[in-house]
Image (tube, helix red, strand yellow):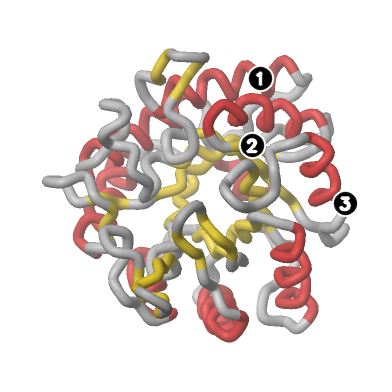
Amino acid sequence: MSEPTIITCALTGAGDSVSKSPAVPVTPKQIADQAIDAAKAGAAVVHIHVRDPASGAPSVEFSHYAEVIDRIRESKVDVVLNLTSGPGSLYSAEGSVLRPAPSVNPPMTPLQRLDHILKLKPEICSLDVATLNFGAIAMVNLQADLEFMGRTISEANIKPELEVFDLGHIRLAKHLLDTGVLKNPAFFQFCLGVPWGAPAQSDVLKLMRDMLPADARWSAFGISHHQFKIAAAACEVGGHVRVGLEDNLYISKGQLASSNAQLVEEAARIVSRQGSRPASAAEARKMLLAQ
């Protein structure tokens, strides 16, 4: 392969996973410590959500984000920080009316969804170019909101990681690029196997890759038992990979992973078997952030 493979580690997410695995980090210190360990294991990028330290529920509290980022930066471990902008997009039905999903996120404007990002200045943040049935709830990202968020992120010199869950999301992302809302070259993240988005299949992954702009870079992940299969498939056809306890709790069938670092170590082995090697944070910056 002509370049090393970026491994992103998604540390904790916002799903109901804390009760399912003791390895899922909850407090800012736990999240930061697992980010540092993941970086030492081979992750060039860490993708960060935060949780309420007492309950483990998803949180949008700025002080939690700030503590995680401060702890990672103070550690001097070199890793690219990627903060989520996803909270605020999840809705559930209350009768015939959609309302912010309880216990997932409060009502948030597009600017509020970016507040922690604009203050903490990570190098990358996620941007879900997606409206879809997300299991029993709905992820809603209207085009006008994406245009506002995309311009705001770009003006802050933060690289958006364009999370796409289906083929139409790639079409919308390309429209945002064509109209100048987002800047080329883009960085896409294929999110596969999520109900009810694109399935975690190698032929789907290749089709999504073939839809991208010629200068785009991309990564992919599959949820649950699809995680390592999709990591191998992405690496084989020139993509980068994402693993982590946000997406998958198991290191092998029936065996819970002990940490995010353990999942990264397995991803590094997969990357090596495909004839590549894990990229360093410096190499990831060169590939993703250089204009």
Q: CA distance from mark 1 to mark 2?
A: 10 Å
Quadrant including the C terminus: bottom right
Residue 179 - label: none
Occupied quadrant, residue 103:
bottom left
Q: Position of residue 14 (x, y in %)?
A: 36, 50
Q: CA distance from mark 1 to mark 3?
A: 23 Å
- The residue pinned by badge 2 equals 241
Dot in front, 3 or 2? 3
Query: Contact, CB < 8 Å: mark 1 with mark 2?
Result: yes
Q: Earlier in the sequence, mark 1 or mark 2?
A: 2
Query: Contact, CB < 8 Å: mark 3 with mark 2?
Result: no
Q: Considering depth in this image, is 78 or 149 the residue closer to the camera?
A: 149
Q: Name the residue located 74 percent from the left edge and 74 percent from the top edge.
A: 177
Kind of element beneath mark 1: helix
Q: Name the residue located 26 percent from the left edge and 34 percent from the top edge.
A: 19
Occupied quadrant, residue 3:
top right
Query: Contact, CB < 8 Å: mark 1 with mark 3?
Result: no
- The residue pinned by badge 3 equals 210
